[in-house]
Amino acid sequence: MSASADGIASAERFERPGFVRLTASDRPGVAQPVPERDIPPQPWGRILLGALVLFLLLMGAWEWKWRAFGATPGYRNSDGAWAEQRRRIDSGEGGGTVLIGDSRMLFDVQLAQWEAATGDRPIQLALEGTSAVPVLEDLAQDPAFTGRLLVGVAPDLFFSGFAYRGSAIGHFHKQGPSQRSGHWLSKRLLEPYFAFYDPDFALPVVVRRQPWPLRPGMQPHTRVRKLMEQESDRNTRIWSKVENDPEYRALARSIWAQNFTGPPPPPMATPERARQTVQAQIDRAAKAVASLRARGVRIVFVRPPSNGPYYAFEQKAMPRKDTWDVLLQRTGLPGIHFDDYPQMRGYTLPEWSHLSAADAQRYTLVLAPMVEREFQRQERELASADAAMRR
């Protein structure tokens, strides 16, 4: 027998082990399909059980880490949570009281105390780090809203147009069934039970904020950390750790201080640009207010407290005479500025911008009757105007 014949005979007698995938040489003259690979028998039950145990141990360790840090289970301040409250207006509650603004309106106004003072539990639509103007415009375009509106004004946000959470409005208008069901599942199955289920404690976020070396020319910048605790209807208070942990409170203050000393954002880069930006935001607010008042909505502006270096920065960057006073004059609306009322001063603001949890309750009990009187005054004026027209 020739050598070539011996090779062919050897190839025919050769059988590959089951764990070796078939190759093109095993299928001569046949179009090559997806490679086949036999999977060797494994104790899959024990493997799955081991993976599950490892997963639970790691998740338990992560949960323990953040509970030891001071976190507790609570509801997430997500776009889905905001959309859920926004839908209440279009579901028959459009004649009630709505709160809009930035984090001061979100943290400082306590819904239970407002309800105790007025008998009405408002819808909380304030968004941290976000001017009230986009939400004001959104409500102006919604004929279902005919109620009463309290608008919070933090000068550096309202008059600059900064909208860190502006995407919440678009999310509300475009939210699909999968997003709504995802929020529903998160709110009922995860948020009330897991302390680690907070964006500030997500692993990618934790990794990003490690002290990595900076590239040449880069300046260190620390993002805003967790500051709030929230309930299911977005009633919000400052996180107790900000109040009680001096190191964490100092961190929160240092993050605000970055804005006091750093370069201004592009819309405010020069005095002329700043003037134009402020004017543009007031124009937008005045236009939205006109639409809302035309259908009988009652509106009050409020300037919540701030103190320390944050207050000094606001006074320098956004002087009252160029911002707040012009806003009230252009809109023709009443405004409650904390500087004008002794009973609205002297509160504790742990990081200069938000009230302590206890003082937020006291502040709300002071603010709510003042706002209620302004609402009632506007209602009387509307009634008188209607009566005059009928005559």
Image: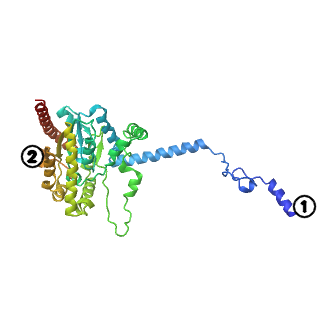
- Tell me the kind of residue under disc 2: Pro
Q: Position of residue 43 (x, y in %)?
A: 62, 44
Q: Residues within 10 Å of mark 2 (few under 14, many from 20)?
A: few
Q: How is the image coloured?
A: rainbow
Q: Nearer the viewer, residue 299 or 206?
A: 299
Asked whether, in this view, residue 73 is left or right of residue 276, the answer is right
Report whether residue 346 is seen. no
Real-space Cα separation, disc 2 to disc 1, in angstroms:
113 Å
Q: Residue at x 38, y 54 (%)?
A: 206
Q: Which mark is residue 117?
A: none
Return the disc, 2 or 1, that comes first in the chain's sequence.
1
Asked whether, in this view, residue 167 is left or right of residue 15, the answer is left
Q: As drawn, which residue projects farthest toward the bottom?
A: 216
Using the rendered view, name the quadrant where residue 332 is placed. top left
Q: Nearer the viewer, residue 61 or 1?
A: 1
Using the rendered view, name the quadrant where residue 315 is placed. bottom left
- Quadrant containing the C terminus in the rendered view: top left
Q: Position of residue 348 (x, y in %)?
A: 18, 48
Q: Residues within 10 Å of mark 1 (few under 14, many from 20)?
A: few
Q: Position of residue 242 (x, y in %)?
A: 26, 50
- Tell me the kind of residue under disc 1: Met
Report whether residue 96 is seen. yes
Q: Residue at x 22, y 57 (%)?
A: 277
Q: What residue did someone put label 2 on?
A: 342
Q: As drawn, which residue projects farthest toward the right?
A: 1
- Quadrant containing the N terminus in the rendered view: bottom right
Mark 2 residue element: helix
> Is mark 2 in CB contact (under 8 Å) with mark 1?
no
Q: Which mark is residue 1?
A: 1
Mark 1 residue element: loop
